[in-house]
Image (cartoon, grey):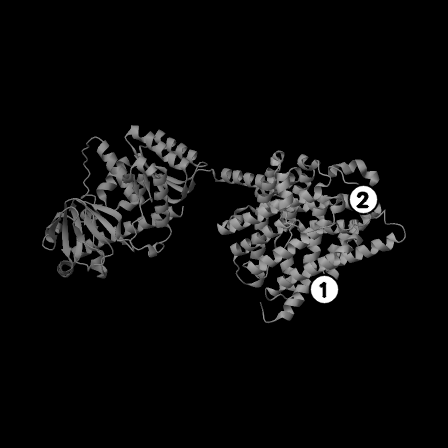
Amino acid sequence: MNANPRADLKAALLGSLVSITQGFAYGLIIGAALGGPFATIGPLVALYSSVVCGLAAVVFGGNPFSVAGPRASSVLVFSALIGYLMHAPELAQLSDPAPVALSLACLSVVGCGLLQMLFAAFRLGRLANYVPLPVVAGFINGTAVLIILSQVWSATGVTPQHSVLALLSHLDEIKPAALILALGSATAVKLLPRITTRLPALLLAVLGGTAIFHVLAAFGWGAALGGTLPPPGDLTLDFIGADVGAVLGASQSLTLVRPIIISALSMAILATLDTLLASVAIDNLMSRRSNGDRQLMAEGLGNTLAGMFSMSPSSGSLVRSQAAIRAGMVSALTPIVIALITLAIVLALTPLISVLSQAVMAGLLIALGLDLFDKWTLARIRLLLARRERSLIGLGDLFLVAIVVGITLIADLATAVGAGLAISLLSFVVQMAHSPVRRAYRATNLIPGMYDDITRRLFVERHGQQIAILEIEGALFFGTAHELESRADELISEKVVHIVLDFRRVKHIDATGARALERINAKLAPLGGLLVVSHVDRERRKNRKNHGATGSSPSRSHANWARLAELGTLQALGEARFFSDTDSAVALCESHLAHALPPQNSTESPVAASPLVAMLDRPTLRVLRGYYRPVNFARGEALFVQGSSPNGAYFVAAGCVDVLIDIPGTGRKRRVRSLSKGAVFGEMGLLDHRPRSASIVAIEPTRCYWIAAADFERLTTQHPDIAFKLMTAVSITFAERLRAITTTLAESDA
């Protein structure tokens, strides 16, 4: 509540005009389904629902500015169910089936409310955000068409037939005066807002059209104008249990359960959509944030109570709320007063229903239907007509809208929405079912990054064509798994025996995609090859609070690991085939390939291929013996660790070492590369004297030549020419590393 009740009362007076007029109009649709003397009960059913649901929504809901009431979508489903029940064999033996049909239809309203509360309890309302826009647009347009078509008989004065198409065979029965009055009323609703906005156009059109009708009726034109609505029937808000129990208790009435359940589910989905979309729009208007699940729970409670006492379904309404907001609503007092005003007017003015003209009310609903047409659809049509070239995407969206509208007219709204969702899903799968392979290359493409691992570089130069790396992106699911297998088959036909799948950009894997990995591995095994997967790693973080500190990749890597473990692929291939980086995965393939190849004698020396050795002649090397010393390291021994002070540079004479960097927050290290015979490392410390940027660990017995920082300073003083040669070799190493980094960056953006 707000301390300014005067503003809220003023807003309630103006807002109630829109709410009552709109609720009355939608009630006429319900009345048309009931027919006969019960036709005028429809508006009462709708208006009482707006009172009950409106109070429940504002008292228990999460959005104090939401004005609830009947909505066209759920009212149409409710009316269609009444029409079905009116002609059901189970009710045919009754002398007056309308009250029982209304009670059974209200049972679906109770189910609608219970489902809404269930949606709110499990926070399923957010699923409404995943309904494609063309499906929503088709649903809205279909609702608009149904409203307009439902008023054809009242607008023309022709006796209602089983189909609107039957009007073509009854053209001689059309009453021109009634048609003119209906179309004039609809036109007035559209034009009056341009003249005045102080009073709702619907109210002015009803008052003006009714006045014109009675003036002409006084001169004997009443029958030609279609007459007035029948006097209101006897509506008692009794509990529906007695009628429902009597009908459903009969064994032959079980066939009624299915349409009631389907209608309840349809109304629950439609009311949920209306509520959540209206709540979001109201939040934008009021610059606030509401609780959508709580609002949905409150409106579900309101519908449950309304259905128990013969009332129609209701939901959050943007039009009603917007009218109150524009009138100055500042607190929850406005919706409460709107509900109370509605109740007072229904109780006091119900007898005046028989004064209203059928043609005028038909024109009123036709105008509402025209306003209901989706603005996005109309804008898309105008945009396509303005262009000479037609967009396939735009045409596809409009085609889906047309399908939903067509099914709405042929079947019903629930079937149309379901068909639209199915078509959208199928379209999405077809669009996503392209090759998941972002890029494919051979291991020879990695040579620029092997500048320090000379032994490995020479091996890859000779045999790297037998190892292929496939970068996978998006979702590896049933729509893309076949494309991956086909690409693997092509590589196998090109003599590739080892395949590395880079999963860095894979967002999801389903059972079909996981099974594809097992099939590819089964094809490589007879060839002596391997299927290895990179960027899939078990989560080993010590501090869960830092889970997102290093970006999304570790989390995605862990998710893919868990998913493959759940599907059994991890066990089928073996955990040793999964790595956190592609370089380690390729290294496993190289090792496996090296063991499978026959022994080969190579004349190429890794040491001779080193840039440092290539620039130094024998006399220079003899001079250097006085400045460096040989050092040996056992397997697993650290030469130095990340963050330590620089103590000189190293030249690998035999063996191999790994370059490792710490991964923050995990307590583990990541291998950057391996360095073999002929490689130089640690030279940066001779230049900038800053702490080590990585750790170096021997992965096998290793022998290095080490020149201490003090000895290098002494060499620079005593033999500047030799020191210059050494620095030139270091510069070449830096250049190769820079080229490798540039190549890697270019490939990552490819």
In the rendered image, is residue 399 in sight? no
Q: Nearer the viewer, residue 622 or 354?
A: 354
* Along the viewing direction, whichever of 727 and 562 lies nearer the viewer: 562
Q: Is residue 617 left or right of residue 89?
A: left
Q: Amino acid at mark 2?
A: Gly
Residue type at mark 1?
Answer: Arg
- What label does residue 299 carry, if any? none
**Would you place residue 219 above or below residue 608 in this image?**
below
> Which of the pair 9/255 is nearer the observer?
255
* Quadrant of the snapshot with the C terminus: top left
Q: Quadrant of residue 86?
A: top right
Question: Cβ–Cβ below 8 Å for labels 2 and 1?
Answer: no
In-front residue for pair 129/270: 270
Q: Residue at x 66, y 67 (%)?
A: 9
Residue designated by label 1: 198
In the rendered image, which quarter contains the N terminus?
A: bottom right
The crowding category of the residue bearing disc 2, from other C-alpha atoms within 10 Å (few below 14, some 14 to 19, many at least 20), is: many
* Secondary-structure class at tag 2: loop
Where is mark 2, residue-wise? Answer: 157
The percent position of residue 471, horizontal first and vertical second, equals: 38, 41
- Residue 210 drawn at (x, y percent): 80, 55
Marks 2, 1: nearer the viewer: 2
Q: Which quarter of the figure has residue 492?
A: top left
Question: Which mark sits nearer the N-terminus, 2 or 1?
Answer: 2
Is residue 596 shown above or below 280? Answer: above
Q: Which residue is at 66% across, 64% downward?
A: 12
- Give the percent coordinates (x, y) of residue 322: 63, 60
Q: Residue 54 appears at what percent x and percent y?
A: 62, 57
Disc 1 element: loop
Residue 24 seen: yes
